[in-house]
Image (cartoon, rainbow, N blue to C red):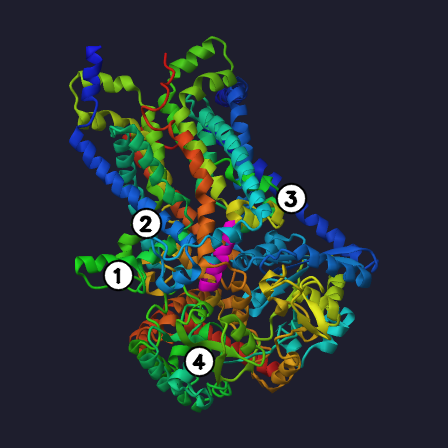
Amino acid sequence: MKKGRRFLVLLLLLCMTVAFSVSGCGNKGDGDAKSAVAADKLNFVELNFYYPCSIQNDDEVVNAEINKILKEKVNCSLTLKPIDWSQWNNKYPILLSSGEKLDLIFTAAWSGYFQEAAKNSFLQLDDLLKNYGKDIIANMQDGYLDAPKVKGKLFAIPVNKDMGQGWGVVADKKMAEQIGADFSKVKYLEDLEPILAAAKEKLNGVIPYFVNNEQGMNDLIGTTKLCESIGLKNHEKILLLDDYIMYNVDTGKAIPIYEIPEYVEQCRMVNKWYNLGYINNDATTTQMTAPEAARNNKAFMNSADQSPVTLSSYENEYGKKLCTAELATGIKTTKTLTTSTAIAAHCTNPERAMMVLNLFYCDRKLMNLYAFGVENRQYILKKENVMSLPEGVKSIEETGYNTGNYWELGNNFLLYTWDNEDPDKWNNLKEYNATLYKSPLLGFAFDNSTVLAEVAAHKNVNLEYLQLLLNGVLPPDEIVPKFRQKDKAAGIDRICTEIEKQIKVWQASK
Amino acid sequence: MMQQLGQCFNENRKRRTFIKSLIEYKGLLLFVLPGFIVVLINNYLPMLGVIMAFKRVDNTLGILKSPFVGLDNFKFLFMTDAFRITRNTVLYNLVGIFIGLLLNLIIAITINELLNKFLARVYQTVIILPYFLSFVVIGYIVYAFLSPVHGFVNFSILPLLGMDKISWYTEPIYWIFILPLVNFWVYCGMESVIYLAAITGIDETLYESAVIDGANKRQQIVHITLPMLTPVMIVLTLLGLGKIFRGNFGLFYQVPLSNAALFPVTDVIDTYVYRSLVTMPDFGMVTAASVYQSVVGCIMLIAANMLVKRISPQDAIF
Amino acid sequence: MKNKSRVTEYNSISGFSNVVLNACFIVYSLACILPLALILSISLSDEASIINTGYRFIPESVSLKSYAFLLKDPNMIGRAYAVTIFIMVAGVVLNVIINSMYAYAISRKDFPFSSFFSIVILITLLFNGGIPMFYYVYVRILHLKDSLLALLLPGLGAGFYIFVMRTYFRQNVPVEIIESAKMDGAKETKIFFSLVLPLSLPILATVSLFSAIYYWNDFFNSLLFIEDRKLYNLQYTMQRAIMNMEFIRRQLSLLASSSASQISRSVSSQVPTETVRMAMVILGIGPIIILYPFLQKYFIKGLTVGSIKG
């Protein structure tokens, strides 16, 4: 055994030496490339762009067309690398930490932007933007470039698109007329109650308010009259931060959502609705999605975002005419403005990457190629800037390139519209954006690195109780004590104190 | 002085015999080589990643230069639900290992004893089928049975028995039985194949002489089959114990449809880690969880192995 | 002759036990087959009837649309099958050879390094360095991204098979045979291939089966290493749709953001319906079942052509 042991030690040492020297190999190359970059602007460079998107049949055709334009304008090629949505969350951290060839990458507040920026996965873009991103600056809507700043520095370029939206409900128009519901008078959540009662009574076999794991009352937080009185409904006084922690602008205090008695009152009402059968009793387990339920006439009403561009897309998706009611107005927050594109830390040619990105903010042809595909193949332009389906193609799904991901890159205001949409869609959106209320915390991003463990534990507690509370599955009086107790054990107080501290510092620095 | 010379001489002798055995067994060393290289690549090189558990990973500096943070990354495992997730993981694993062992043995032995060999083959083929399904699909199937809306159990079976509907997805207690049941349903068919193969290898003459001595079926099983299967049983049990802190993610996440009401009973270490980090990926913390699970499993395995060494030393794993 | 029949008489279970056992197995088999029948039924159903009445064992209205949809692009499916079959065959062969050789070497009690190499394998079963590091090794050090080797290599060197085979070799390969062969001057390779392997058919068949199923079912390695869609294997092609659906149902709520509805809209327009997803499951299992009966005879007693003895 003794000689075996010695052999073992020797072998382990050998392995470790091999491993360390070999891993050194992996990183060496990048250093050389970076130093060579500054020299020649006109040599051909290959870049790639990773983003979440379903794989399309014509991906390569579209990519080839994009590369034609890019070669002509900045002498480079961009390989589009769509990653399936279900894999995106798993893959992007691995891509960023492995140090492999990665140039442009999609990011967003909900896709780990702030975490990855803290981990130095992205390059700082302030100088690059100034030197190579002039069209970005020119075309970007006001306030957009403030949002993705981490400690005053920019680590990603936002996509120029909608800046926030209101929340409310959509309901089947025919059914609404059938039961005599008038949505124009609906201002608060409780105004829906008589409508739901009528729906329950008169519409047989139809769920009055459809809730599932994906959407439900979590989008309608604070939409009651009571909540309006404390400044929650329109976000004047109380703001919703990450992980359902609320911040009171007046008092400067951060508290978890169940500590707001007015909101708990809303949950009591929703719980009442759940018990009365207005909400489907399989809310936490149903496998149906809202579009499926709507298309098959199984549901009357469900939550939906509200903005000039969304109604028509909902009507298309559900296949019927809808009534809407807005219950919460839109607000521009850091979160809504950080769907963006970043340049990865190990990018071999950041200048060229920024130049390419810049093109997506000013070149109309390029932007529409990415969004909708190749002209005359995926669509034809009968009128200026208005698309129609090509001959013989019956629906948008059959064009061979239908990503629906136009909002992930570039300047959406360069996009064409379909012939069944409002041709002024994008102008309307611009105006709507200007009317949106600007959050007092816009530009603030919470750095959770000192309370990482508490945040992870708190997220788990949220997942356990939140849906039950928000969607009224169980009475709040039953859930809140348990929620509170577990949250305290998870360290919610430490998180709140840290948030308050950081906000004070940020406000002082402005 | 003479003693030191003597020691020197002995060490030289050991070194010489070491090199001698390398040469003498070079054939077998060549046998081991391909597997060894594969394992170096697949397991030992990546194992360096273990240091991430002790670091705050910085993607510009790379893994090697990222700052050390000691045991910080392990904290989140012990904050709120530590007891619950640990208890669940361990108990489900113990049930899976020991009752699974029993079931696998029963299946393997009885399949061999069936009189109609054709039927035996048919059963054996059918019972491995569940292994092919992914847990996502199994989640759908379980939902088809237990759904509050159209589920077979609530709408077809319980009414026949005159019982009230049960809300399966909000009552944790049933899942203590449902999850192991699904686990056995998926794995027993396949795992029993190992025992079947082992039984096939048992020398026929042992049975023949036992029969001549007048042994009946039960005695044959107890005195021949089981003892001959003991080494395999021990190896599989030891390996299972080495994974005692690892939960089967597919089973515990997909099948209960990640329903929060069921967490007290369905939450295991792996699902807890997943939920904590899915919106906030941090490789340091993920690796820390894995290291935690490995270390405990290792200790378990060593302890169990020592126990086995005392009882039947030739079956110990090392 | 007479003795033999008496022996076999005593060596069988009673007729009553046989009936009871058969009954138990019929119930167990039904429990395994019914869910698959359900999946088959869903895949043959009309989409609307699924939403309205839920799953049914016998479809309310039969429709072959789901299979037509899947087979619309025979190139993609054919290619996926080809990749999977190739990887599976290569993988099984390599797996059996590499692992059995390793297991045999450490099963030999006279091999002085047997416990060292056993521990080497044992450690790999207990500790792993995590997926990011695994990815780093394969993509950055070995440059195996988008290569078939990346699908093949991770499945080799499986400690579990090695330990099971080691146990089998120790028990079923008599030391005397090996010693006498060595005294006759036979080399290790000859002993292994002509003596040991033929004695070990059951365990080889078992390991072949397990690794065949591993390679057939594997989509994780494709997920990690394959971006070139020409190299997608069958399970990955099929699972993608199901996983995308699960993403909408489960993960999207975790994102809780204003973009959720946009994401949901763009993903769900791509995800095929329930019936198509179930058809994918059926197509994903199908072929391996055909292979199975050929291997089966090696590990059910009484079906093997008698083992070589003496």
Q: CA distance from mark 1 to mark 3?
A: 55 Å
Q: CA distance from mark 4 to mark 1?
A: 32 Å
Observer-nearest of A440 and A417: A417
* Front tag of 2 and 1: 1
Answer yes or no: are tags 1 and 3 on the same subunit: no
Contact, mark 3 vs mark 2 (Cβ under 8 Å): no
Residue for badge 3: C143
Q: Amino acid at mark 4?
A: Lys
Badge count: 4
A98 horizontally vs B134: left or right: right
Residue for badge 1: B155
Q: Amino acid at mark 1?
A: Phe
SS at mark 1? helix
Mark 1: few/some/many CA within 10 Å (<14, 14-19, 20+): some
Instruction: Name above or below for residue A337 compared with residue B263.
Output: below
Q: Is residue C281 visible?
A: yes
Q: CA distance from mark 4 to mark 2?
A: 45 Å
Q: Earlier in the sequence, mark 2 or mark 1?
A: 1
* Front tag of 3 and 2: 2
Q: Which residues are magenta?
A: C238-250
In reply to whether residue B89 is colored magenta, the answer given is: no
- The quadrant of the image that shows the C terminus of chain A is bottom right
Mark 4: few/some/many CA within 10 Å (<14, 14-19, 20+): some
A273 horizontally vs C250: left or right: left
Residue for badge 2: B182
Observer-nearest of B251 and C190: B251
Q: CA distance from mark 4 to mark 3?
A: 59 Å
SS at mark 4? helix
Mark 3: few/some/many CA within 10 Å (<14, 14-19, 20+): few
Q: Amino acid at mark 3?
A: His
